[in-house]
Structure formats: C-alpha cells, structure tokens
Amino acid sequence: MRKIAITATGLILAALLLSFCKPVVRMFMSPGEPPAGQKGMTTETPGIHVQVVAEGLEIPWEIRFLPDGDMLITERPGRLLKLPLPAPDDSPVRPEDGHAWTVDSVHHQGEGGLMGLALHPDFAANRLIYLMHTSQKEAGQAVNRVTRYRLTELGPIDAKTILDNIPAASFHNGGRLAFGPDGYLYITTGDATQSELAQTRNTLNGKILRVTDNGEIPPDNPFDSLLWSWGHRNPQGLAWDDSGRLWSTEHGRSGLRSGFDELNLIQPGANYGWPAIEGDATESGMHPPVKHSGPDYTWAPADLAWLDKRLFFGGLRGQALYATRIQGEKVAGFHAHFVEEFGRIRAVAVGPDGMLYFATSNRDGRGRVHAGDDKIRRVDPADL
C-alpha cells in the first residue's frame, strides 16, 4: 500500500511539474517557432529596421502624441514625461531631455500606479489630459481614479477627479483610457482579483466604462449607468477600426493554468463572460472572443492600436508585438513579431508620422532588464 501511495504522489507531482514547465518551455522557444496551440499564427523575425527613440524610462504605460509631435508618456511609479520625438536615425532621447513631472497621490504597488493617459478631443484648444492612477484612501484602501488636468509648460495643473472609488488591487486594474470617435471617454477596469465582480452590474470592476469628458453618464449608455460592457477580467487595450467599431484586448486566466487571453469586438451592453466562459465556450447571453490564445499559450495582451486594417498589440508574458489582420468581424491573419527579442511589450501607439511605436515594460519586476531599459522603439508598419 505504501508503494502505491508513493507512486500516486509521484504522478501528482509530475503533473504539477509539467503544468509549471509549459510556460518555461515557451520562454525558451526559438524566435521563429510558432507557439504550440496557436492555430493560424506565424512568427516573424526578419531583418526589420527598428529604431530606439527613447531609453532610460521606468515602466512606461502609455504613449500619446501631442499636436507639436512631442511624446507624452506615463510611467507607472508616478511620473508624466514630455519628450521630443527624435528624427529617423537620431540618438534616443532620455527623461532629462524633456520635462518630467511627478503626479500627486499615485500609489505604486504591483500592477497599480500611474496607468492610462488620454488627450481631450479638443486638446489643441483646451489642453486637457486625463490620467488613471491608483491612490490610497485614509483607511489604507487602494482605489483607482480618473483625474482631468490642464497641461502647461510647468506641468499638469487644475486637477479635477471625474471618476473615483474604483476598487483596486495589486493585480487586475485594467487602466486604459481612450476617447472614442463619438467624443466620449472609455475606461477599462479589471476585476481586482475578485472575479465575481465582473458579473455584477452594479460594480465598476471588470468593465469597460463610457463617460462624458466631465465624468457623467452619456444619455445612450446601456443600463443608464457608466457601464458600456461587462464580464471582463483585465482589459488593457482599446482601439477603434475604420468602421468605428471598438476592439479590446483582455488577460485570461493566470497561474499554472495561464492562457485564454482574448481579443474582443465590443458591443454596448454585452457580457464577455468572465469567469463563466473561456476560449470557445459559449453560454446564453455571453459573448466569446473573436480570437483567443488557447489554453497552453499566454499573450498577456496590453495596449492596442489600429492601423492599415490591422490591430497591433503588445504581449507582456508573450514578449512579442502581435499583428492581426481583420476582415469583417474575424481575424484573417495573426503574426507575432520580435518574439523574446526586446522583452515585455506594453504600450503601442501610432505616431503622427504613420509609424508604429511600442514600449517595453522590463523594469516592472517580471522581465529581464536589458541595458538602457525601458525603451520606446519605432518601426515602419509596412515592414510587419
């Protein structure tokens, strides 16, 4: 009996070890090898010219471009940077080459801190910007809030909180901000590690929210609330295609069973199923993703950008820049670029020059730090 018990224990340990080793094996795959379980995806590592435009950053989270061409960047520990954009083949800029301002009341812990950044649609006239960041209340409770500022040469001033008391946690804070073509502000929130909140309509967690530029409820929102969609785990990317449709990237399950990351086409009022459904599973009243990573591979998808009928998004654990060609409501092509070449990729943005910009997040405690990290790189999307 003792021998049988030992054998059973050994089998259990072996199974756990195999589950743990899957992501480790993926980390050390050759860059040109398509990840297992990624049907329809090819990896691309040609000799593409990539220029480093900024370096010496600390966990950059968002990149926006000002009308004069300068970059506005949030760093998760709580710094807002305004940096000039170097010309092709110029040396990369560093924080000391521009302006750096500390944002008040930022609480940087785990995945929380200074996150999303959006420019008001009429920024050129009113100079208004919006920041999403984690703060601590008097009782020590962490919350996420969205604050509006006026950007001046002396930094952001005239702070006005437009949305507050979004429960925060060390993980799953969402954090993306973007104004849609309708002029409303969209905000992603994570489930703050409490998955049941995503399926509770009267909470702000696990949602995509839609508000006016003053933080009020738009008259055509579903449910007469701030909610635009729900049933999300940790959405971190927002982008609109040429038809004005909203797409979002979302983190799937984590831990030893990591996988089922998602690309979703967002419909107003729709429920995207977390935690009830994953992958291709269906349930009445819930929307499965347009594309998912499968059960054995993790993108950990972050920022999302639309360009030339393609969606580009960064992969944190996937350590890649992903490109998806969209036809109708389906993904017609899926490519992974720079796999494990630069590390964890979070921020992705289209520049005023039509080039694609992406930033690493290697100093966030989960990546291997390269010399000069973190960096923002520029690449011609025609080469991808």
Image: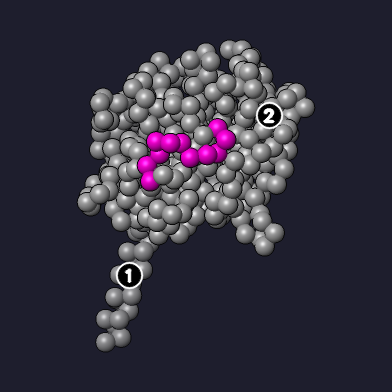
Res. 342 in view = no
Which residue is identified by label 2? Answer: 150
| Residue 265 located left or right of residue 353 | left
In the image, residue 365 sits, relative to residue 196, either above or below, namely above
Of tags 2 and 1, the one toward the viewer is 2
Which residue is identified by label 1? Answer: 12
- Separation (CA) of disc 2 from disc 1: 58 Å
The residue lying at 31 percent from left, 30 percent from top is: 334
In which quadrant of the rendered image does the N terminus lie? Answer: bottom left
x then y, percent, for residue 350: 49, 22
The residue lying at 32 percent from left, 79 percent from top is: 6
x then y, percent, for residue 62: 56, 33
> What secondary structure is the stretch in magenta mostly built from?
loop
The residue lying at 61 percent from left, 12 percent from top is: 87
In the image, the segment drawn in magenta is 213-223
Q: Residues within 10 Å of mark 2 (few under 14, many from 20)?
A: some
